[in-house]
Structures are given as structure tokens and as C-alpha cells.
Amino acid sequence: MNRSLVLLTFVVAVVARAQTTKSTTIPTPTADYELREWAIFLAEPLSPRANSVGAVKSTLPSFVVSRRADAQGEERNTVMPMGVIRIVGGKTPSPKFDVLLNIRSGEFQGHWPKAENNRPSRLLWSNLTADDSKPTLSQVDEKHWMTRLREGDSRYLTAGRDTRGERFLLYDPEPAFVVPLHVEASSNGYRVANASAFETSTLELYKSKPDGWHKAFAQTLGASRAASKPSTQSLDVAPPKIKAGDTLSVAFDYAQNVIAERQRIDKVSDSGDFVLPMFGSIRVTGKTTEQLEVEIQTRFGSNGGIGLNKVTVTLQPKEDVSAATGPTGLSADLALSTETFSDPKALLSPWKDRLSAAGVGDVDVAMMLEILNKYAIDAGRLTAVYMLDRDRMDELLPEEVVPQPAKVTRVGLVIVRNIDPDINNEIAQLIKQLGDDEWSQARRGPEEADVLRPRRKIRGGKSNPRQGYGGGVARRSGAAIDRSAEVVPIN
């Protein structure tokens, strides 16, 4: 009797212990709606960031806070590179959900509707509800592109008790971005290699010639054997510090109408210095980009009151630069088409079916084509457009939605400008013209180059025909540039 009681007690204890040690993992909740997202990135080989503030002006409505300079006149109605998130399907109204979007390296220059944005690299839209009922929308001019964006087939979104809402979540990203394409001229087109650890798909090149537009196409470019995918790390790690050999891009948004250099891109010297316009060399190593931005703004403010609305410092580590120019493995020879196009819209029309097949809605496809038509076509120079690998999109813009949608579609397009191998020849010709003894020829060089425009005026108002190109006064006795001329506001 006692033995049976002891045995029963032992069995009960074992069962109880097994129940307490059983896995308590809670399954991730799943919603019944779809999340559809698209984004376009404008990139250049010498720019450390895509959609850089120097290349893209804001055309967001006035009620959207943007860190970019505003486009003017009719350009205000022209759509800009951006990202859009929509919620499609599911029961209405939906249960509350959150959308968290990060930039691993870079910052958001604007977004709408208003989100929790306690740091520039993070957006959190919380307590969202998706519904068919139309909420109060902020007023937009009927000619503005946001009016057309609101026609997309998706749920209306509101947050918490806010009676206002929107039909999408919009963000303006400026991520650190290394162009992975390496382009060389070949006998009948171009030789293109991919320096990235991610596959490049649906690559199309565009080149204008006297007889019209030509293009070349590659379905895929395999990932580089020499590259490795970035390691997954916490988004809250300490910001990197600048070191010798890194490339810095410094963009200046002046408070006054000043004729001066507005963007400087250069490497940090071996001694740890970087040359600023009007100030010369300053020590930058050991600082973060945020610390350097504060220091530059302080220096400008204390130097005769040259005010800055904003200074943006972008860091491209030397390791990333090496990855973009190092071994790339096999390359692909892409022949330009014999078929010519006179209308850029016809040239870009195949993207309509490609984007639709990727899951992008009709309204958004039309919007993306407008952006391509504005930014992907450059008369006389080679440009490229390709579809961003999904893993690369997730690495560039990590996203978390709670509860998880039943399906997530993320489509990214990259527009690459200034990759034409002929640019080197153009630069060499301009340099030759600048050194020409005949002033009429020397003057032509700067006038033909966007980056070499008259930038300065000497205090005192005296005319100087040799003044202003490249940011200073060119001395005819040599190649040296005198940058001591004082910059003054233009009234």
C-alpha cells in the first residue's frame, strides 16, 4: 500500500515537471491582409548615398516635413524617387498593427503620415487600422502627383483615435549605397560586371545616339565571387567613426543665396584631414558623421555669419569603396539594340509588364514609370535601371510588421546615372580646355561642365574674367587655384 502510494506520487511529480519544462514559445500572429511596397533609388558611383540631397529636390506637399530643399515652380508637381507601402485585402476594419522601417545606414529625409521618428534612421507607424471607409485626408492640389497616388487600390489607414488618415505610408529614404555595376566599353556595346554579393536582375542600359535611343538587356548578373553579404548586426550599434581612407560627402544647404560649393566629395587623407570649402583642412578622423555635422555648422556660423540651414555628412568606409572597384568575377557583354526609339516612354514601356508581374498595382506602376522617365534618361550619356534583389532590399531597409501580413511584396528599382565610360574622355577634354592658352577655349570647358560653373564673386565688385570656375580664381601662371576669395551673399 505504502509502496503503491510512493510510486503514484513519483509519477505525478514526473508529469508535472514535464509540463513545466514544455516549450512556451508563442506562435507569431499572422494577419489576413497583404503588404505591398515599392521604392526607387537614384544612385551614382561617386555618391555615397542613393537619393542624395544634392541630386533630388523635394516635391512632397507642403504639409509634409522634408529635410530636402524644395523644387520650384512646375517641378513641384513632378514625382520624386521615394518608397510607398500599401495594405491590400483582409477584413475591415483590421485589427491594430504596427509598421517599423529602418535604414541600416543613412536617414529618412521625409515621410507621411506622421510617424514616431525619434532618430533619422527609424520610422514607426503604430496602432494602425486598415479600413474601406475614407477618413479625412489632407488637402492636395489636384495637379499634384499625390492626388494620383491616392487612387491606388488599397485600404485607408488611420492611427489610434486620429480621424485623419491616408491610403498609403510614404517614406523618402537616403540610404548609404555603393553602386555595384562596373561598366566598360566593348566592341558593340558594354561589358558589365556586378561587384555586389547580391544578384542583379532585369538590368537594362539606355544610350542615346544621333539616330535615337538604344538599349541593352540582361536578365541576371550573378553575384560577385569576391564579395560577401554584410553580416546581420543590431540596428542600435554605435555609429561608425571616420578613419583615414574613407570617402566623405558633405552637402551644404545655405541659409542665404550664396554662390559657393554646395557639395564636396573626397577621401580623408592619411593624416586624417578633409578639405572644406572656404576653411581648408580640418581633422575629421575619430568623429562620427553627426559630430562632424555639428562642428561644420558651428565653424560656418562663427565665420562672418555664413549660416547653414543644414549640413549633411555621408560616410562611405574605404572597405565599401574597395568592394565596388575590386575583383568582380565574370562579366557580361551587352550589345546595344539595333532597334531605335525616339520616345523615351516607349523605351521604358517594358517596365510596365515587369512591375505588374512583380505584384505592383496599376497606379503605382504608372507612378514608377513617371520617375523612370524623369531620372533614368540622360541625353548623350549611358544610364542603367535594374531590379533590386529582395534580400538586398531587406538589408537596405529592414522592415518589421506586427502582426505579420499574410503576404509581403517588396519591389525596389535602382536608377544608376553617370556610369558612362565616355565620361572619362569628357573630363580629360575639359581639363585640356581649361589649360588652353587661348582664353576663349579655356572658358568653354567650365561652361560645358555642370560641376565647373562660376561660383564666386570677389568683395569689392571688381570684374575678374578669370574668376569663379571650380570655386576660386585660376592663376594663369600655373595649375594652382586660389581659394582665398571671400564668398559673399548675392542680393
Image (cartoon, rainbow, N blue to C red):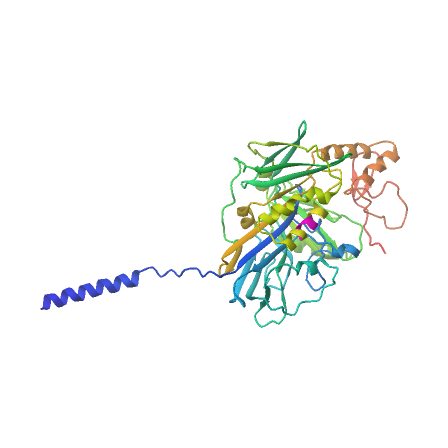
What x and y, as percent, mark residue 420? 70, 36
Which quarter of the figure is the N terminus placed in?
Answer: bottom left
Q: Is residue 34 left or right of residue 77?
A: left
Q: Residue at x 54, y 68 (%)?
A: 93
Residue 259 at least partly seen: yes
Which quarter of the figure is the C terminus placed in?
Answer: bottom right
What x and y, as percent, mark residue 261? 76, 48
Location of residue 189 by image quarter: top right
- Magenta highlight range: 367-371
What x and y, as percent, mark residue 389? 56, 45
Instruction: Count all numbered tags in the image, as a single digit.
Output: 0
Q: Is residue 147 left or right of residue 194?
A: right
Q: Nearer the viewer, residue 95 or 265?
A: 95
Residue 322 at least partly seen: no
Magenta span dominant secondary structure: helix
Name the outermost residue toward the right.
462
Location of residue 215 by image quarter: top right
Q: Nearer the viewer, residue 413 or 430?
A: 413
Q: Residue at x 66, y 67 (%)?
A: 137
Q: Nearer the viewer, residue 285 or 112?
A: 112
Name the outermost residue toward the top.
187
